[in-house]
Amino acid sequence: MGMITNLKTRLTPFFAFLYSTAGFFVFFIFFLSCQNENNNKAVIDALPVTIQLDRFDLKFYDQSPEVIPGLKKEYPFLFPKQFSDSIWIKRQKDSLQLLLQKAVSEVYEDVAPLETKVSHLFKHIKYHFPKVKIPRVITLTNNVDYQIKTVYSDSLLLISLDTFLGTDHPLYEGIPNYVRKELDEKYIPSQIVEKFSAYTIPPTEDRTFLGQMLFEGKKLYLQDLLLPHEEDHLKIAYTEEELKWVRENEIYIWQYFIEKQMLYQTDPQWVERFLEPAPFSKFYLELDRNSPGRVGRWIGWQIVRKYRDLNPETSLEELLRLPAQQLFNQSKYKPKR
């Protein structure tokens, strides 16, 4: 005993902590977690996925009309058959289109950093969804249609670069601030995941507010997996201040949902007020002016995260197919003050 006591007194505080059974167990779990994370990272980084942006925008604008027949063969999905070549020639010369393309060319003169980000993202997608095809990624301009910034299918990804010129770009003057804040290159990865998630997660037939909220929560949970190094405010397209607000008010948002008995209602107003993009969420209370939009998505995200913490053995495929009621019950979600 004397020898052991002697040894313990000579140990540093860190090793004294490890000496205890509980401390060793905690350290062992932490060590395994770090090892798994490092191993996963090594596997993901080694995946042979390299994305090169196909710059349709550069091939179409500032070019002669003679390029159009070739482009129609190369990109038939971008040229609806009901439109004649004269329409495309006119578009090539349209002053507004040329202004947009000039802005795109200036902001995206060098797309190598963006290609690296998108490649990194699709390495994660390939790791978690091995059967997914790596799509052809094409950039274009689309009249700053911020409701369709990206389009995803199983073999094709379209990115409208004119919707990612930067929040304060002069061309966005007149667009509402809550929309403008997302028109920035830093949101391209999360926007891609948003479209990938909608394509990948089985559509919910549950029209209750809870069902819709957890469908959005699953989409945001995929952001955690596919963009593990992104900050939460970028995943949900909040400012840092908006993220702080929902974190600090999570319990009050939840209490409001419960008091209004919203979870099992199918009234579309709840989706509009708390899930759809908006400058703020509509509680019809004084706090509205400080709240960000889509707080229901935030709550759904936290419920899915809580479920995952308690049920790590559930496969990703099972989780994405899990009925809302079962997921909610097993999450035991209850925000704390």
Image (cartoon, grey):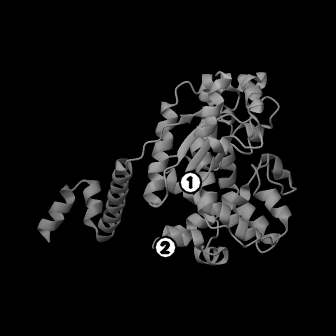
Q: Quadrant of residue 334?
A: bottom right
Residue 337 seen by the camera = no
Residue extending farthest left: 3
Q: Is residue 66 left or right of residue 51?
A: right
| Percent coordinates x, y for residue 186 in the rendering | 59, 38
**Label 1 crowd bin: few (<14), some (14–19), many (20+), radius 10 Å:** many
Residue extending farthest right: 284
**Label 2 crowd bin: few (<14), some (14–19), many (20+), radius 10 Å:** few
Q: Is residue 89 left or right of residue 33?
A: right
Residue under numbered circle 2: 314
Going 52% across and 69% down the picture, which residue do you hit? Answer: 317
Q: Is residue 253 above or below residue 140?
A: below
In the rendered image, the quadrant that contains the C terminus is bottom right
Q: CA distance from mark 1 to mark 2?
A: 18 Å
Q: Looking at the image, tell me whether mark 1 or mark 2 is earlier in sequence order.
A: 1
Going 77% across and 21% down the picture, which residue do you hit? Answer: 95
- Element at badge 2? loop
Q: Quadrant of residue 69?
A: top right
Please tell me which residue lies in front, 92 or 291.
Answer: 92
Residue under numbered circle 1: 223
Q: Is residue 266 left or right of residue 225?
A: right
**Type of the residue with mark 1:** Gln
| Percent coordinates x, y for residue 231 in the rendering | 55, 46
Going 67% across and 67% down the picture, which residue do you hit? Answer: 203
Q: Residue 104's mark?
A: none
Please tell me which residue lies in front, 194 or 141.
Answer: 141
In the rendered image, the quadrant that contains the N terminus is bottom left
**Type of the residue with mark 2:** Thr
